[in-house]
Image (cartoon, helix red, strand yellow):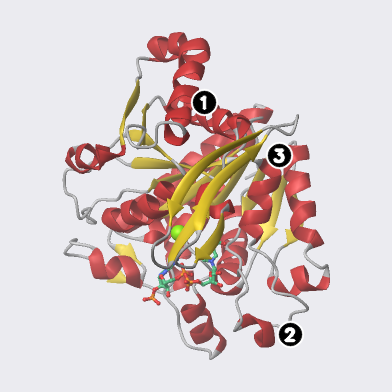
Amino acid sequence: MAKIQMKTPLVEMDGDEMTRIIWQDIKDILLTPYIDLKTEYYDLGLVHRNETDDQVTVDSANATKKYGVAVKCATITPNAARMPEYNLKEMWKSPNGTIRAILDGTVFRTPILVKGITPYIPTWTKPITIARHAYGDVYKNVEMKCPAGSKAELVCTDKDGKETRETIYNFECDGIIQGQHNKSTSIASFARACFNFALDKKQDVWFATKDTISKKYDHTFKDIFQEIYDNEYKAKFEAAGIEYFYTLIDAVARVIRSNGGYIWACKNYDGDVMSDMVATAYGSLAMMTSVLVSPDGIYEYEAAHGTVQRHYYKHLKGEETSTNSVATLFAWTGALRKRGELDNLPELMNFADCLEKATIETIEDGVMTGDLYLLSTLENKKKVNTVDFLKAVDERLKKLLG
Ligand code: NAP
Ligand code: MG
């Protein structure tokens, strides 16, 4: 069979530990036998980030801007323990943080549903996609401890030097304060990314903040979303038969009672917390896909989980691992499908569809890694190792490709 050809390279960001092992296995077993894989390769493994003073991360993000689509392996965000382990020059920043700052995007996380794994919320029969605003709020805060007797104020000096002040609190005892910000441009990008993604997926958008309490901060999020929706998306949404729905963050009650099948837009912190909750409720972090979408239509696909360090140390000792490769696999299929869409390569898009289908069929046939084996209610389930799972997917992929 002739290999599927590509036009534009994918930006390939390699990573660390067990996911780096899986990355190569996926390419060897499921991609290069079928595709004449064109990638521009960036090694974001911690060793190479350290060698390049993290320049490679910046270069990979700039390449993503140039080509439009990237696929990223999980990477280590160094902490104190990693300093001696990798003999680091510096405690390099989170690559995801660096990439997000350059691409200015929104992160969409969607669970992969399979028969036999029932969500902890059984009414969730369709996936809920969490759209997390990836800029500002508590992640770019400044904070102080205030001793008893201090007066804390919020001061904004405009470009002419005029000050506006608000008292935060007059402290009769020791206390704490925190200053947060966000930018209208970033909130607008967030809104557009959510509305575009919704049109792409033909799903409703739910957005929730606490605007009744936060009458300026959260209310601005609400207003910007509404204005952009009314001016730019209302007609398109109506034509697509989908809705934009704003509600208070107390929406969690509705979310729990829903059947899923929509995009839940969350402010940065809400998205951080809710995406972990939603992933866990659907079954496993290893079944969660993640894509960063920038306002100018750039896509970066990855798995939501980390480098699965514990499994890697077993692997290094020569022990067998049963690590779930599904989210990493879906990062590749997402990126290949998007490349196919942009370059008008139906064969490549079909390949991505078939590979996803083969992966789900494998699990629904009862062949799965240890994490899913613990959760699955299938009677004929069988636990396999990391590589045997990929080989089982390949058997089914061959049949689907005919
Ligand atoms: P993790 O790699 O997500 O793994 C935590 C635990 O979750 C694992 O020990 C494993 O549980 C389970 N798990 C996660 N993914 C799995 C998979 N694919 N298959 C089977 N089980 C899986 O998180 P971590 O151990 O906290 O972090 C490890 C490193 O990843 C850190 O250096 C962190 O900085 C990095 N990280 C990177 C990203 C990213 O690049 N996007 C995201 C998060 C963390 P059991 O051990 O019980 O089997
Ligand atoms: Mg988190």
Q: CA distance from mark 3 to mark 1?
A: 25 Å
Which of 371 and 224 lies nearest the eye of the viewer? 224
Q: Secondary structure at mark 2?
A: loop
Q: Nearer the viewer, mark 2 or mark 3?
A: 2
Residue at 47%, 80% in the rendered image: 310
Query: Image quadrant of residue 357?
Result: top left
Label 1 neighbourhood size at 10 Å, few (<14), some (14-19), many (20+)? some
- Residue 391 higher or lower than 264, as above or below: below
Which of 37 and 65 lies nearest the eye of the viewer? 65
Q: Amino acid at mark 2?
A: Asn
- Residue 19 rendering spot, x and y as whole percentages: 55, 68
Q: Amino acid at mark 3?
A: Met
Q: Amino acid at mark 1?
A: Asn
Label 2 neighbourhood size at 10 Å, few (<14), some (14-19), many (20+)? few
Q: Identify the residue under disc 2.
A: 87
- Residue 7 rendering spot, x and y as whole percentages: 74, 36
Residue at 23%, 63% in the rendered image: 376
Image quadrant occupied by the N terminus = top right
Name the disc covering residue 6, or none.
3
Q: Secondary structure at mark 3?
A: loop
Q: Identify the residue under disc 1.
A: 196
Residue at 47%, 62% in the rendered image: 305
